[in-house]
Image: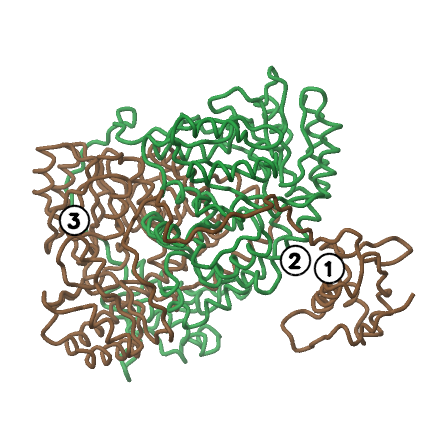
Chain colours: A green, B brown
Amino acid sequence: MQTLPFSTLIAVERQSAIPIFKQISNSLIELIKNGKIKPGYQLPASRDMASMLKLNRTTVIAAYEELQAEGWLEVIKRKGNFVAQQLPVTSPRSFEVSTPEKLSSQNQEIFYRQIAVRQPITRQLKPYQLMINDGYPDARIAPLDLIVDRYKFLSRRTNVHNKLLADGSNGSISLRTELALFLSKTRALDITPEQVLITHGAQLAISVAASMILQPGSTVIVGDLNYPLVDRLFEQLGAKLIKVKVDHDGIDVDAIENICKQSTPSLLYVIPHHHHPTTVTLSAERRVKLLDIIRRYRLPVIEDDYDYDFHYGNAPILPLASAEHENFVLYIGSISKTLAPTIRLGYLIGGEDFIWQASKLKQALDIRGDVLFEESVAHLFSSGEMQRHLRRSVKLYQKRRDEFCELLNSSLGNTAKFSVPNGGMAVWTLFDPEYSIPQLSERLATRGVFMNDGSIYKYKNDVNGIRLGFASLNSNEMQSFAHALKGSW
Amino acid sequence: MQTLPFSTLIAVERQSAIPIFKQISNSLIELIKNGKIKPGYQLPASRDMASMLKLNRTTVIAAYEELQAEGWLEVIKRKGNFVAQQLPVTSPRSFEVSTPEKLSSQNQEIFYRQIAVRQPITRQLKPYQLMINDGYPDARIAPLDLIVDRYKFLSRRTNVHNKLLADGSNGSISLRTELALFLSKTRALDITPEQVLITHGAQLAISVAASMILQPGSTVIVGDLNYPLVDRLFEQLGAKLIKVKVDHDGIDVDAIENICKQSTPSLLYVIPHHHHPTTVTLSAERRVKLLDIIRRYRLPVIEDDYDYDFHYGNAPILPLASAEHENFVLYIGSISKTLAPTIRLGYLIGGEDFIWQASKLKQALDIRGDVLFEESVAHLFSSGEMQRHLRRSVKLYQKRRDEFCELLNSSLGNTAKFSVPNGGMAVWTLFDPEYSIPQLSERLATRGVFMNDGSIYKYKNDVNGIRLGFASLNSNEMQSFAHALKGSW
């Protein structure tokens, strides 16, 4: 049998990030694919190949084992290593002889919903140097390494899948237990782990809660303004929005009572801390009144308290859900806001039966979460690391808020005004009615700064404002933004 | 100033997993919390504290810095470290003086959907030694470490958030690009990254696609039997199911044509490879016929091809979506099936406009995915590691299928029958009508083996069967299962 010149056919790069045995198996696969080595061909014994390539024999054995595992090689005992007769690259079976002409997309029939008007894609040539979000935490200070290390540790345990299957679709039992404890300590919520449903982000928690209650034609009371994505969600579910004014003390609860006197709304959506977008807090007096309305009119409520942990100066006010509400208040929170916008974890708290039913509804939308990841985050709570991270974040964000508001004062000029928020991660900035935020946004873009153009808040009203997130900006970044802002008027 | 006996108050364990500086800061926080150290108290200088505790001075400095970052300590220049006057533990403000009596949950009003009959919780005392799932991959062979390492590497990069914000709610651009490439190579799908929507698992991809098309009262054609969670999803969306028989060659396309002649169904849901639960493949002949029906009757289709990559012996058949279908076929796939049930990644492929609109609808349900995680999985594709993993898996699962079916033959007895599946991860097993699968399931539980009781397939029909997943079981586990099965008749 003639031996191919493998020392020239197989190139080994010792500096490469790819392990050498993989480089060998990859090269051999290429040789098989392009026909240089045919099915049935006997490869040199590992000892011979090793000496040809000037490598350790174990490296060649590892490469052969890899090839065998992938199905490229057949090992016949006491005979040797042969290229498999049936290679793992099988072409799929086609089933159509002739393909009809492709229609132009102009003629496309629309059999589906039109959610929004499609805008032309403006391709961005250079990436922005600085991006202003509408209120994200700073992922750079989050203990992501601890989560990742725990995840790696857990993924190597053999009983992981038993745990997974046993925990079901409500989410990891450890995380539900830790959250019940954390929420009782920080928010005086008297709950069991059975009352916690973990979701892929708080938005999905709101989706599940709303889907449990709303039907096409249902009415929902929302703030005016309100978080635009929640308005859109309710509309997608076929509900009608009743808008109620939000002032300095939060949503107008007298207006809510008037609505309840005249009709039977299916749901109220309320953001008690740092209302989105205007950042106001629902006052204690209004909370007492609202609880009374909830009880008297049997009004189901989604209380979206995404910002509870981020209160500066004075203390946060306990949630509606901490008082007796006969299970009418469904409480929403977010771990994404605590750690990083990429970490997608939210939760829904409700009566035990509600949560059980909601977990069934959720399962058909989204089978389960990454329970290993949830376990890793649970460990962050049980080790106290999450609580420490929160204290560090609050302290830092308070400082950043102060610095940011000072910079805004000196760089915004007379066209815009804002109030210093007493918590949260963004400043709500209102511009003069005739001022064009989209133009400002474009001018900032030429300076490498991304800033929203405010169009999402303009949805069905004439508000001329944007949220400017400060929590994720360090001092240098804030100053760059203020500088760009000054130059863009 | 009197110094407290810190050497006895602060216990340092050198063996602990908690870093020593954290142990010191934790002890000091406890002393502050329980009042042993009061606001305004001056801590010993780091040099003095270090000598008292017999530790390196840098360790004490790290502890002080931690306390300062969390807000427990104030550093006054040239004076020293003082316990903060305003401690970071602020009690939230309560707003209700008297709390009304808690109602018993018996009297609870139901203002929400009842999805399913609630069963009593049977608390499991011992964890199962072995769990039989209905067709999961073996996470133990998945390259999870590579994903985790990449994730860690990416999370330390500073431009991560620019990337995140730029990629939008369709999912990471890298992963969409890699998937478009992978699907064109393996399935002859002629698509661009703009036609790919990444979702948190394939179930959410189906939810989004169905929500784009269905309205309350719409009709959907589904297989009889069908994947129960999809039936439930369609019903939750208010649609009516029209059930069409599934035989050895897949769903009955003549029956579909008859339905289209008499009415205008809104949607067809089809699983072309290894139909769930029965594991049959839709034949090439029927695919040709079905494509003709789709084009003639303008019938939107969700093609759920979750199992395409796992075909043994002969080659898979190309999807409907690979032929010309005038954008009527929406194609669904799953990365969870390729890697591990905990990795929640699925995708939806459709016309460019459909996907754009669907991404807007999805955004209101579930804002975004973990784009860092998606980037890490994209790297698995670009490095070729995913393709190698697939080849290894297919080879291993084919072997496991053969071994499992042989074991089933000898341990199932005459009460049940099955066909060897030509792909996928589970065997569909049908029992005699009078045989009680729940009883078998209970007997297996006493032997430490979890097996489904088949009730999910009994939903609105009288099928007496279960899916037995083999892909995640190694040889020992299969033999334990067969042994437990033999002893449980």
Q: In this view, does A318 lie above or below A379?
A: above
Q: Can residue B424 be seen in this view?
A: yes
Depth check, mark 3 against mark 2: the one in front is 2
Q: In which quarter of the image is the C terminus of chain A?
A: top right
Q: How far apart are marks 2 and 1 (CA)?
A: 9 Å
Residue bearing the label numbered 3 = B223
Q: In this view, does A209 lie above or below A112?
A: below
Q: Distance between the residues labelled 3 and 2?
A: 53 Å
Q: Can residue A1 be seen in this view?
A: no
In depth, the one of B119 and A393 nearer the eye is B119
Depth check, mark 2 against mark 1: the one in front is 2
Are discs 1 and 3 located on one and the same chain? yes
Residue bearing the label numbered 1 = B66
Assess disc 1: are there few (<14), some (14-19) or many (≥20) residues with their C-alpha within 10 Å of its C-alpha: many
- Going by the numbered disc 3, the residue's amino acid type is Gly
Q: Distance between the residues labelled 1 and 3?
A: 60 Å
- Going by the numbered disc 1, the residue's amino acid type is Glu
Residue bearing the label numbered 2 = A388
Q: Which chain carries label 3?
A: B
In depth, the one of B121 and B446 nearer the eye is B121
Assess disc 3: are there few (<14), some (14-19) or many (≥20) residues with their C-alpha within 10 Å of its C-alpha: many
Q: What residue do we see at 30% from left, 65% from top?
A: A37
